Image (tube, rainbow, N blue to C red):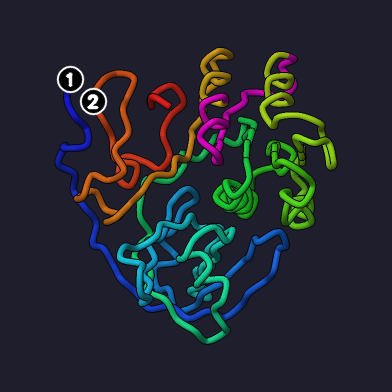
Amino acid sequence: MKNIAMKRTTMKPIVSVDVELTKRKDLKNDYLSLTFSGFNRARQCKPGQFVHIGFNIAGVFYRRAFSIAGANASEQSLEIILKVVGRGSRYMANMKIGDSLNFLGPLGKPFTIPRKSQTALMVAGGVGYPPLLYLANYLIERGWDPKRIVFFYGGQGSPDIVDRARIKRMGVTFVPTTDDGSFGFHGRVTTPLVQALADKTYQSPMIYSCGPEAMLKAVDQIGTEFETPGELALEAPMPCGFGICLGCVVPLRAGGTARVCQEGPAFAIGTVKL
C-alpha cells in the first residue's frame, strides 16, 4: 500500500510574513482572541487551514501551528483564538498591541465546503471551536442559510463555552453541552449529535469536527455508524508545517500514512486510525 506521507506533492509557494498585533480580546478562562494585521495572504485563507507561527524567544525552537479563526482580505488581517497552555501560547497572551510575530501560511488542506442543500453539523470541543467558527462565518458570508448550520459546542463546564454571544449572533442553531451540566445540555457533546442523527432531525447532514482526540474518535465512529459524511480537523506536532519533517504523520485505515500538515488537517470521516 502506498505510503501517502512519502508521496510527492506539488507545493505552493510558502510565504513567511511579519504581522502586527492590532486587536486583542480576553474571552475568559485563559482563552484569548488575537487579531494580526499585515498578512497579505489573508485572501488565500480557507476554513480548516492554519498558520505556523515563529517565536523569537529562548527555549522555543520550533514554530507552533494555530488554526485560523477568521480572515479579512480587505484588511489583510487574521484572527487567532488560543488557550494558554504552553510557552508559545503564553508568549502570545502577553503580547501588547503593536508587537509582531512571523506567520507562515496559510498551510494545510481546508474543509470541504458543503452544498447549500446540506446541513452542516459542527461539533467542537474546547479549543477546537475556532476553525468551526471560521467555517460557519465563511458559509454565512457566502449565502448559506444559518438555519442549516448546527453548532454543537462541548466543554467540561460553563467557563469552557467561550465566545457564545458571537456564535448566537450568527443565527445558527447553537447546542452547548457541558460535562457537569452547568450550561446547556448535561453530558458529552456527542450525545445530542447522536440524537439528531438517529431522529433524522436535519436534512442531508454533513459533520465537521475539531477538538480533543477522544471526541474526534467518537465523532468518527458516529459518522461511520450513521453513514453520514463529514470531516475531522486533526492536531499533531508540526516542526516544519509543510510536509518535510514527517513529525505529524498519522496512520490510515486503508493502509499507509498521511501528513496532517499536507493531506490534512481536514480528513474525511472513516479514513484515519484514531
Which corner quadrant of the image does residue 246 belong to? Answer: top left
Stretch of the chain drawn in magenta: 199-218
Q: Which residue is mark 2?
A: 256
Frontmost residue, 11 versus 36: 36
**Residue 160 in the figure: left or right of residue 251:** right
Looking at the image, tell me whether mark 2 or mark 1 is earlier in sequence order. 1
Amino acid type indicated by mark 2? Gly
Relative vertical location of residue 87 with respect to residue 120 in this rendering, above or below: below
* Among the 4 quarters of the image, the one containing residue 259: top left
Q: Secondary structure at mark 2?
A: loop
Whether residue 148 sits left or right of residue 221 in the image: it is right
Q: Quadrant of the C terminus?
A: top left
The disc placed on residue 1 is 1
Q: Is residue 106 above or below residue 198?
A: below
- Residue 124: horizontal and vertical position, in percent? 62, 40
Membership of 216 in magenta stretch: yes
The residue closer to the viewer here, 157 or 168, is 157
